[in-house]
Image (cartoon, rainbow, N blue to C red):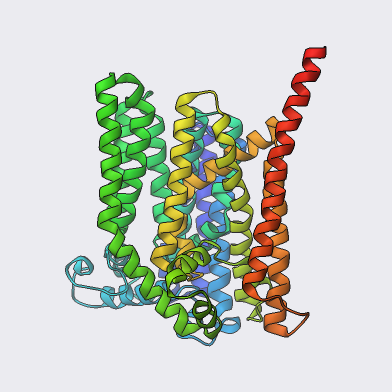
């Protein structure tokens, strides 16, 4: 037997036995041996597939470590939360049962009930289950419980699967970026993709997003390898999109639209004649306008509903919305949603330590990612390669649109909004990784300016929230503070732009003197 295969099998079996033992102890069911065997089998198979795919896609040691770390972190945090939430979470049914998300608790409970009934597990597609409007994840979960865990409800088995999918996309994503761009950008993007806090928390929960993130990375890879193997490209895109339809048809449509436009820009546009190019551009513009027209009412209705829920839940928000007037309420709620999870609020809010730690972890990840995304949008215009400039513009536009769509769909909610946004993590991770490499190699100051603005803004809001929750310090009125912060941000950014122009001219004149 080949040495690498022996190592792969040994790691898989060892990992399976360890997790099997953990499940048998923490989530035993009626017969702990069943839990041990089932968890060991699923974990061993997951580890084997992750190692196989990583080696097949030419992964280096850095990629291997990232894949193993991503899987382990998600599973470890998931098991830890499952164990701690009943004792240290809020006194709510879902926390008491070991679930971080209410959606996960409700869907998983329905899946267990379906598995215990006489109905086929595919009944999730035939009947309307409010806990899973698509039916796919409910069916998959019910199938695991019915056929692999009939003696007991074991949510940890589903955590193994979500951890697996959370890590599965990493080698595909790394290989795609390496092939289409270069290894430095691939490595930087890969680490962001693997360790993004929101993705880790979702992978540590019984949610659909980890599956969608992993599948979207496979579709991402499929587009990038079209010029190497059309068969592999078509297979990867087809399987990943069909699987996504099973989990979430709306997400599948959004991913399909994004990769279709990318494919057209990368592989079709430059090879077409002038007439076809003009026809393609007109068709794309009409398609975007049609999508906006068809989806606008849905977005507005969703925003109004979420606005109502947010007003009902928070007297402070209701007061602020009355101040700004009805005309600006929807823009306010969408902007507030983009900022979620709000880092200053999560730091200051006097909540339970365990859930505060989770909230701070999620918020810190988003607030570290935002400066990279903004800087990337500012930097890619300088690209000399026209095709790369088009692709980077598309990615930036996709991220911006999906971020605002997610915010409009989920309003200011600090849980739903970020998880909807994370579906396009591959695009965000690439943009952030590209920005980081270009910032370091080109010695750009823009990232540090954006970070400075964010630190100042966060500092003001931390003081504002300290005053709000604890009565410390004198608090500025909200809107005057916003105007002051906008002025400070404008001074830093405009000043940076003027400095760059002056510095470029100085270097040019200095070069001429030489």
- Give left or right: position of 251 versus 63: left
Q: Position of residue 420 (x, y in %)?
A: 43, 60
Residue ID at (45%, 84%): 312
The residue lying toward the viewer, choosing from 67 and 322, is 322
Residue 503, image quadrant: top right
Residue ID at (62%, 57%): 367
Q: Position of residue 472 (x, y in %)?
A: 77, 82
Residue 196, image quadrant: bottom right
- Give left or right: position of 445 versus 157: right
Q: Is residue 31 visible?
A: no
Q: In this picture, is 304 found above or below 210?
A: below
Q: In this picture, is 198 found above or below 231?
A: below
The residue lying toward the viewer, choosing from 511 and 148, is 511
The residue lying toward the viewer, choosing from 64 and 260, is 260
Q: Position of residue 492 (x, y in %)?
A: 72, 49
Q: Is residue 249 visible?
A: yes
Residue 355, image quadrant: bottom right
The residue lying toward the viewer, choosing from 221 and 320, is 320
- Give left or right: position of 251 versus 13: left
Residue ID at (59%, 52%): 370
The residue sitting at the bottom extreme is: 91
Q: Position of residue 127 (x, y in %)?
A: 18, 72
């Amino acid at each position: 037997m080949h040495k690498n295969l022996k190592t792969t099998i040994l790691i898989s079996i060892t990992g399976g036995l360890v997790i099997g033992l953990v499940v048998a102890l923490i989530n035993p069911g009626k017969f702990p041996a069943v839990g041990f065997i089932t968890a060991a089998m699923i974990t061993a198979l997951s580890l084997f597939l992750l190692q196989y795919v990583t080696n097949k896609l030419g992964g280096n040691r850095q990629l291997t470590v990232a894949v193993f770390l991503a899987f382990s972190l998600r599973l470890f945090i998931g098991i830890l939360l499952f164990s701690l939430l009943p004792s240290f979470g809020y006194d709510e049914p879902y926390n008491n049962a070991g679930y971080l998300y209410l959606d996960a608790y409700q869907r998983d409970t329905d899946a267990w009930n379906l598995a215990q009934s006489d109905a086929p597990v595919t009944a999730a597609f035939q009947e309307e289950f409010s806990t899973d409007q698509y039916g796919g994840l409910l069916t998959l979960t019910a199938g695991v419980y019915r056929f692999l865990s009939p003696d007991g409800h074991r949510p940890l088995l589903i955590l193994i699967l979500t951890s697996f999918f959370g890590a599965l996309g990493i080698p595909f994503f790394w290989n795609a970026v390496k092939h289409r761009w270069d290894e430095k950008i691939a490595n930087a993007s890969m680490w962001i993709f693997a360790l993004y806090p929101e993705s880790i928390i979702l992978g540590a929960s019984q949610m659909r997003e980890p599956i969608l993130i992993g599948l979207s990375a496979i579709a991402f890879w499929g587009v990038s390898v079209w010029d190497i193997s059309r068969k592999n490209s078509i297979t990867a895109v087809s399987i990943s999109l069909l699987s996504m339809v099973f989990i979430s048809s709306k997400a599948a449509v959004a991913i399909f639209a994004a990769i279709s436009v990318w494919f057209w820009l990368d592989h079709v546009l430059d090879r077409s004649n002038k007439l076809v190019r003009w026809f393609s551009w007109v068709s794309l513009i009409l398609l975007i306008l049609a999508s906006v027209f068809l989806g606008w009412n849905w977005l507005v209705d969703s925003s109004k509903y979420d606005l109502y829920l947010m007003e009902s839940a928070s007297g402070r928000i209701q007061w602020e919305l009355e101040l700004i007037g009805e005309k600006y309420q929807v823009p306010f709620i969408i902007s507030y949603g983009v900022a979620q999870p709000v880092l200053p609020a999560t730091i200051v809010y006097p909540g339970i330590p365990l859930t505060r730690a989770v909230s701070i972890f999620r918020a810190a990840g988003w607030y570290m990612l935002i400066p990279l995304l903004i800087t990337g949008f500012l930097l890619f215009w300088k690209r000399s390669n026209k095709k790369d400039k088009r692709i980077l513009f598309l990615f930036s536009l996709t991220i911006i649109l999906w971020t605002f769509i997610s915010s409009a769909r989920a309003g200011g909610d600090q849980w739903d909004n970020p998880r909807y946004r994370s579906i396009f993590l591959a695009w965000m991770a690439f943009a952030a990784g590209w920005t980081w490499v270009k910032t370091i190699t080109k010695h750009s100051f823009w990232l540090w300016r954006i970070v400075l603005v964010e630190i100042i803004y966060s500092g003001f809001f931390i003081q504002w929230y300290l005053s709000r929750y604890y009565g410390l310090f004198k608090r500025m009125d909200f809107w005057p503070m916003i105007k002051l912060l906008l002025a400070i941000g404008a001074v830093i950014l405009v000043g940076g732009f003027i400095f760059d122009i002056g510095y470029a001219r100085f270097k040019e004149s200095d070069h001429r003197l030489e």
